[in-house]
Image (spheres, rainbow, N blue to C red):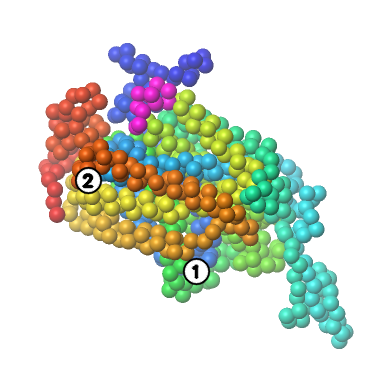
Amino acid sequence: MGMKEMLRFKNKTSSGEIQDSHVHSNDENKERGNWTRKSDYLLSMIGYAVGLGNVWRFPYLAYKNGGGAFLIPYTIMLAFSGLPTFFLECSMGQFSSLGPVSVWRVVPILQGVGILMVLISTMVSIYYNVIIAYSLYYMFASFQSVLPWSDCFSWSDDKCSKTTRGFCDVIVNGTIFTHNLTWVKDNNYTCIANTTVLEDVELPSRQYWEKVTLRQSSGMDVTGEVIWYLALCLLLAWIIVGASLFKGIKSSGKVVYFTATFPYIVLLILLIRGATLEGAFDGIDYYMGSQSNFTKLMEAETWKDAATQIFFSLSTAWGGLIALSSYNKFRNNCYTDAIIVCVTNCVTSVFAGFAIFSILGHMAHVSEKSVSEVVDSGFGLAFIAYPEALSQLPVSPLWSFLFFFMLLTLGLDSQFAIVETITTSLLDAYPQVMKKYRIPVTMGCCCILYLLGLVCVTQAGIYWVNLIDYFCSGWALLFAAVLELIGVCWIYGINNFIQDIEMMIGKKHWSFWLFWRACWMFISPALLLAILLWSLITFEAPTYGSIKYPTWGTALGWCMIIFCLIWIPIVAIVKIIRAKGNFLKTCRPADNWGPALAQYRGERYKHIIDNTGVKNDVEIPSVTAMSGCDNEAYL
């Protein structure tokens, strides 16, 4: 195939009509296309939900909040907050076959919420691929017989040390002497209580991360130069994303068969290897064993951490769930899918914790420290603590390569969905343009996002990554989720929404909806609103470790989030003006709200006019009609 044909990537149907490459002849929706197989969708959703946070955040939160006891609030928050919101978004996308912006035809005045979701996803995609670039760099660095962070090499300074340094008083032949800790240990003496003075030392893995990988500057206001090897890794990351998405879900749906399953293979290998090491049980004991502290359940912070982790782990309110579900066939059972993905996500988090803590336990054993002294989260776990632990294993380059390759695949799955959210929104807004130029537009998005991400691979890059994450992955998403629940369940109406779902999955007994009604209308909004208020009340200026951000940096963070939020009132005002001041009209579904395909609209949506301008006068029996039930509203 020539370059021209590859860029166009068009196929002609038997009637001579030009058709997009992301639409196959057996697709139900000839305009947007559908997932080739249901497994493509499920693996894409699992890959989107199961991300880096499952590996580098949940295990630490569980350890911090009482170990096994943390599973109680975690499970409760999953049932009453995470799963209901997840199910709601999947249902919205599948029912309408629309992305996160256009889906707000259901409540036009809140279309700004959809824009907020897409803008947040766009900003997150910039720094998320930088983290993937870090993983690529460490993966390539693992192709050495001796891991470069395994000891204090030429790049280190005097503070670098693999062991604890300091001195203390000991009694030798009845006389008190002061000796360094290494001498005390080698000669089997015991320090006199309260005489130990520790030097400020840093692990080789920490100095390698800061001095070699990041070449970290002293602060955000010291930009420095672009780090060429990270810029190349970032370019490679975007090439992988672009190549995987060049045919939309048709290509990414195949890639996820590897990227969504490989992390489980690596986690299992790491767990088996970790379980055979000395000290592994101590690590697991700290994680979920006898160290479990049920008194933590009495602390509000524990419940807040559980709710926050569930919400962000499932990727609700990002727009990706709506975007991916919009490519489902109308009769797909989104209810079962939501449960499968949510349960898989949570089980993965718990399972990953065992793999992480077994090896951290061995690290603590070798370094003669307690597990609490070596455990960390986020960047500290992924690029400092765990690499340090892996460097102490036999055949350490192999284990290091597997771990960072796993991080790479975990990140790619989520990045695929984030970029697909952006392109899906463009597809809904400009269907004819996207149908003709989908591949160039996708590649163009990747190029633009790569250029925007270059600031994140300067010497001050880590401060930018942390700043975007701090502001854009926080309370704004909680605000979007609360408005989403209010808009769908209170403005559009819970009865209407349930009827829409039953058009897809079939009529259910009224008792089936009692739990979902309670969650959607009261429990989930209340929980999310509580977390939102807590986040705002306890807000603190961002820092990276002990380094504070300049005033202009914090102001820039607020500008980013205000730029995303401001579209909610702007769009609402525009909608009201276009409705000539008729506020109630903007709260009612648009005339073109409903199933995308005429054969599924039934009596309720027969008024919808197709893109061809033909009114839907042909009524095809729905699932409920075929089961002998009607679609009338009920209380």
- In percent of the image, x 64 and y 37: which residue is there? 231
Whether residue 271 is visible, yes or no, is no
Q: Quadrant of the C terminus?
A: bottom left
Q: Is residue 530 left or right of residue 591?
A: right
- In percent of the image, x 30 and y 29: which residue is there? 29
Residue under circle 1? Answer: 66
Q: Is residue 125 left or right of residue 23?
A: right
Q: Position of residue 55 (x, y in %)?
A: 53, 53
Circle 1 packing at 10 Å, graded few (<14), some (14-19), many (20+), is many
Q: CA distance from mark 2 to mark 1?
A: 49 Å
Q: Earlier in the sequence, mark 2 or mark 1?
A: 1
Please check the rendered image and state whether residue 509 is part of the magenta-colored stretch, yes or no. Answer: no
Snapshot quadrant of residue 251: top left
Snapshot quadrant of residue 311: bottom left
Q: Is residue 116 above or below residue 434?
A: below
Residue 583 got which mark? 2
Q: Nearer the viewer, residue 453 or 269?
A: 453
Whether residue 471 is visible, yes or no, is yes
- In percent of the image, x 30 and y 52: which residue is there? 485
Numbered marks: total: 2
Q: Secondary structure at mark 1?
A: loop
Range covered by the magenta-colored residues: 428-438
Q: Nearer the viewer, residue 506 or 239?
A: 239
Q: Is residue 407 left or right of residue 278?
A: left
Q: Position of residue 360 (x, y in %)?
A: 62, 60
Please check the rendered image and state whether residue 434 is part of the magenta-colored stretch, yes or no. Answer: yes
- In percent of the image, x 23 and y 53: which residue is there? 490
Residue that lies at the very extreme toward the top in this rendered image: 16
Q: Secondary structure at mark 2?
A: helix
Circle 2 packing at 10 Å, graded few (<14), some (14-19), many (20+), is some
Amino acid beneath label 1: Gly
Q: Nearer the viewer, residue 119 or 612?
A: 119
